[in-house]
Image (cartoon, rainbow, N blue to C red):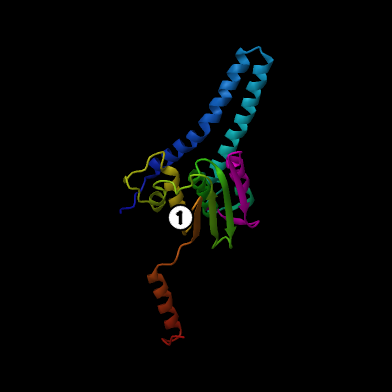
């Protein structure tokens, strides 16, 4: 199947739509709370409005901080990101009564695209358990060759529809819209980070595994040929 490509304008527009979709709900709740404060004299209603504003402001801030790393530049080209920062924004975005997030990772700086990938995989893991549950993120290895294993366990767990095709860049529809841009973008980041992403499901648990992409067979042969020449043509 042909790989779908998006030009820079379409990609940026779809990602902006995704971020706006995530932020508009808490921002709208803040506006509603402010309107109640303006119109209500009841102390009880004013307390309710203030509580709504506080909760919604925290939610909007958490979603923007997450988007800054998962979708944004979050530093100059080639920059590294602290895994602790990734954990903090992931917990702020998804840690609630419905979903419990556990995180196991070294205290280290990892290449930006690899950190962006793991955060985008967390988003996908959340959609794998629509009724909530437990998501475990495990990061092992060094920054140049890490292994990410995310498990999402919960009722009605399933590999999200079309996600594997979207990550591969080959959506069945042949197009990408604002609803599909996040997994499609995750695939772009995975390829930029030279990582393979695989899905599996067993019972009520979906597993997402990302690891360094294997070198093409031709590249391996080229390396071997080079070694043979260096050894005067005598293989070892």
Q: Say what secondary structure mark 1 lies in.
A: strand
Depth order, front residue of 146/164: 164
Q: Is residue 108 above or below residue 66?
A: below
Q: Does the stretch in magenta take in 129? A: no
Q: Does the stretch in magenta take in 100? A: yes
Quadrant location of the N terminus in the rendered image: bottom left
Q: Name the residue at 58% across, 56% down.
A: 138
Q: Position of residue 149 (x, y in %)?
A: 54, 56
- Other-residue count near label 1 (Cα within 10 Å), few / some / many at <14 / 14–19 / ≥20: some
Q: Name the residue at 41% across, 42% down.
A: 180
Where, by quadrant of the figure, is residue 105 drawn? Answer: bottom right
Q: Is residue 120 left or right of residue 46?
A: left
Q: From the image, tell me which residue sits under label 1.
A: 199
Depth order, front residue of 130/15: 130
Q: Which residues are magenta?
A: 87-112
Q: Position of residue 46 (x, y in %)?
A: 66, 18
């Amino acid at each position: 199947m042909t790989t779908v490509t998006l030009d820079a304008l379409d990609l940026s527009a779809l990602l902006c739509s995704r971020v706006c979709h995530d932020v508009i709900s808490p921002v709208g709740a803040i506006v509603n709370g402010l309107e109640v404060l303006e119109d209500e004299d009841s102390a009880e209603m004013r307390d309710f409005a203030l509580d709504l504003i506080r909760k919604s402001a925290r939610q909007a801030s958490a979603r923007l901080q997450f988007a800054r790393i998962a979708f944004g530049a979050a530093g100059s080209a080639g920059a590294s990101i602290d895994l602790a920062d990734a954990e903090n924004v992931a917990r702020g975005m998804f840690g609630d009564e419905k979903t419990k997030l556990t995180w196991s990772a070294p205290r280290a700086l990892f290449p930006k695209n690899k950190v962006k990938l793991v955060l985008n995989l967390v988003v996908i893991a959340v959609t794998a358990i629509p009724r909530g549950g437990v998501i475990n993120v495990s990061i092992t290895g060094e920054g140049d060759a890490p292994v990410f294993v995310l498990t999402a366990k919960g009722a009605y767990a399933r590999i999200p529809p079309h996600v594997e095709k979207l990550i591969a860049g080959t959506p069945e529809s042949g197009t990408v819209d604002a609803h599909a841009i996040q997994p499609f973008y995750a695939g772009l980041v995975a390829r930029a980070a030279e990582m393979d992403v695989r899905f599996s499901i067993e019972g009520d648990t979906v597993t997402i595994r990302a690891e360094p992409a294997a070198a093409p067979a031709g590249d391996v042969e080229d390396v071997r040929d080079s070694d043979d020449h260096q050894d005067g043509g005598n293989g070892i």
